[in-house]
Amino acid sequence: MRKNSTQTKLRFNTRKDERAAKALRFAIAFVCFFVLLGGVSFLLLLKYYDFDLSKIAKTQEEESTVEQTETAVAQEIRGEYNYLLLCTSDADNAIRFAAVLTADMDHNALSLSPIEADKEIAAPDGSRGTVQQMLDDGGVSRLLSALEYTCSIDIAKYIRSTDSGFKAAVNAVGGIVMTVPESIDVHSEKLTFIINQGEQTMNGDTLLKYLRYHEGDLAGQMEILAEIFRQTFTAAEFSSADRVYTKMINAVESDISVLDFEQIKRGVQQLIAAGEPVSIH
């Protein structure tokens, strides 16, 4: 009979091998135990000192946000921005005054351009009418589109108030100091107004009457509006801009959002630093 040349080799563990394997298992277990104990102890220590690991990520995010904000603030606002200012009566929507306020940020200057209520303008659809008619027919949106189309300008935002809203807005800034060149005593169907000559601090009601007294005198109305901006846009007055904005935005109709106001505030601060006056066009 032929013997099979392939033989199965059997390996027997000696006691020496068993002791070596046991020592290795013990060493591995000891190291694992030491790592686990050290990790738990470290976490307990952090907790004892009120340390929050999430604060690391949060702090990095906050630092990044602050850096982005500081960069944005450091950048000057450039370009030209137009804003429609409009005041109408409480009762019949009659225009008290209308003007375009232009902020020229390249030259750090403000200017006011009056708009006559009976000025004829054209809408993009080809229809024509006066400023008052455009407002009556389609509200502020139609008036805006017609002014942009006729005057070839871009109006960024608008502020529209009624008599009541104008009074509330002026009262929100504590009144406006005006110098009256001569005493006024008017008694008519439209207006009753008495005021002495000289420097006067006018509240909203008095200032609105003073504006109405200059009805038809666009230059006089624009000078009053310019004085409002001159006194409002000062470092002392604008320090409470956020509080004033909250009061004023509730008194008027506007498409200026909180984010828009933050940009406007930066622009005003830039104008204040430049010290440029409000001019009349």
Image (spheres, rainbow, N blue to C red):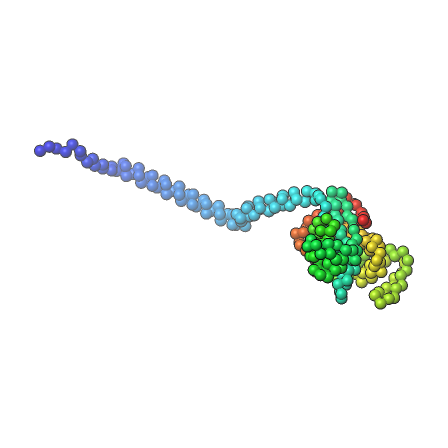
Quarter that holds the N terminus: top left
Residue 36: x and y, percent? Answer: 42, 45
The residue most toward the bottom is 189
| 147, 187: nearer the viewer | 147
Q: Say whether residue 22 is left or right of residue 165.
A: left
Relative side of 264 to 32, left or right: right
- Measured as percent of width and height from the top left, residue 263 is found at 68, 49
Q: Residue at x 89, y 56 (%)?
A: 181
Does residue 262 sit above or below 11 in this rendering? below
Please give the count of numbered marks on the rendered protein: 0
Residue 76 lies, in percent from the top left, at: 70, 43
Compared to residue 110, the image places residue 204 above or below, namely below
User: Is 84 left, or right, of 186 in this rendering?
Assistant: left
Residue 60 at least partly seen = yes
The answer to whether residue 264 shows anywhere in this view is no
Given residues 246 and 22, the one toward you in this image is 246
The image shows residue 123 at horizontal and vertical percentages of: 71, 54
Q: What residue lies at 90% left-to-right and 60% top-to-bottom?
A: 183
Residue closest to the far front: 126
Above/below status of 195 relative to 69: below
Please report the residue visible at 77 percent of the width from the left and 62 percent of the height from the top.
94
The image quarter in which residue 115 lies: bottom right
- Is 225 or 13 nearer to us in this picture? 225
**Residue visible at 21% across and 36% down?**
10
Determine which quarter of the picture holds residue 120: bottom right
